[in-house]
Amino acid sequence: MPAILGSYRFLNMQASSLNEAASVTTASRSRPILRWLLLPLVILAGMGLSVEAGLLGPLGVQVGHLWATLSIFGVGSAILFLLLLLAGRQQGPALNELPRWQLIGGFLGPIYVVVLTLATPHIGIAMTMIAILSGQVGKSVLIDHFGWFGATRKRVNGERWLALALIVVALVLIARG
Amino acid sequence: MSVFLLLLVVVAAGAVLSVQAAINGRLGQTVGVLRSSLLTFTVGTVVTGLLIVFFEPAHAVSLLDVPKWQLSGALFGVVYMIVMVGAVPKVGTAVATVAVIVGQLAMGMLIDNFGWLGNPAIELSGSRLLAMACLALALVFMYRSSARQA
């Protein structure tokens, strides 16, 4: 899911692909009615992510974490391959013309899914989701603040530190049960 | 593995995920969401397959033995992707992000509380509800700070 998975989970509102996708078309915001119709759909999509995580944990216990991960990537690849065939010609450069480092996403994806199958049977799905969120927020706050990985160093405002602190509190609360 | 240690691992996985999301976001912009996702999934399949060949111990139960519904996880991910591609330009990134998180957590709580899908039941306690409230507040702050910078 990682791609998706990837796409799924970001709170990092500045660097996410969603953000980039949205920036192209922010001008064409639709009528309010359509927005309110779409919102439940997006919430349902988010619920699907938890269902996915809920399926992964028990599956990993039965067949092994790597096999469970393979089921996600294997089925996902097959579906995406079919969708791509049906979608016809795609715009943009061929995949083999891209800079190699952009392919790293595929290596990072399995790490995430394996951790998901490992963790959910022990700490529950809600807690896993919160921990993932705090990792995402923490990463973006720290990278911005310290300028890691060659990012431009910029001041992280108080609200984002506060958000991070609140997420950590949430984690501690859930960890204590 | 202790819960605390496990928690740290999951937080680290969240950080990895957001690095991946940033890389894939750029990739998706140039080659399209379908192709970037297929690439990620294919590489993920191959990497996982290699890891299985060399590291995974044998299990009594294989993927082909479990009930088929347990293999449907990937479908939810693909549906998610399609919904996001369609909805984000219309509702905006921030609203979509918050809506996804609301859905994730609500469903996560439900699955935990009732032990759906074969998961161990974890009762919805006062501190879990309080944690939700903290998270909601955190999202408000994130939203405000990114709205100001935009």
Image (spheres, helix red, strand yellow):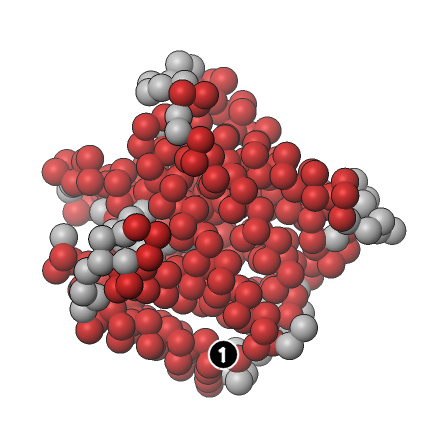
In this view, the residue in front, B27 or A28, is: B27
Residue A41: percent from left, percent from top: 37, 47
Res B10 seen here = yes
Q: In the image, what residue occupies the spot 21% across and 66% down?
A: A156
Would residue B45 appear left or right of B84 to someone viewing this image? right
**Would you say A70 lies left or right of A139 here?**
right
Camera-nearest residue between B97 and A141? A141
Q: Residue A16 at what x, y percent from top left? A: 32, 47
- What residue is at 69 percent from the left and 38 percent from the top? B49
Chain label for disc 1: A
Secondary structure, mark 1, is: helix
How many residues crowd mark 1 within 10 Å: few (<14), some (14–19), many (20+)? many
Q: Nearer the viewer, residue A134 or B107?
A: A134
Report the side of A12 relative to A107 (left or right): left
Q: In which quadrant is the C terminus of chain A drawn? A: bottom right
Residue at 85%, 49% in the rendered image: B58
- Residue B18, image x and y in percent? 40, 53
Residue bearing the label numbered 1: A174
Q: Is residue B130 left or right of residue A26?
A: right
When the figure is inspected, residue A148 is found, relative to residue B4, above or below; the finding is above
Across and down, in percent, residue A64 comes to 74, 53
Indicate whether B48 appears above or below B1: above
Farthest right residue in view:
B60
Residue A66 in the image: above or below residue B5? above
Closest to the observer, A176 or A40: A176
The amino acid beneath tag 1 is Ile
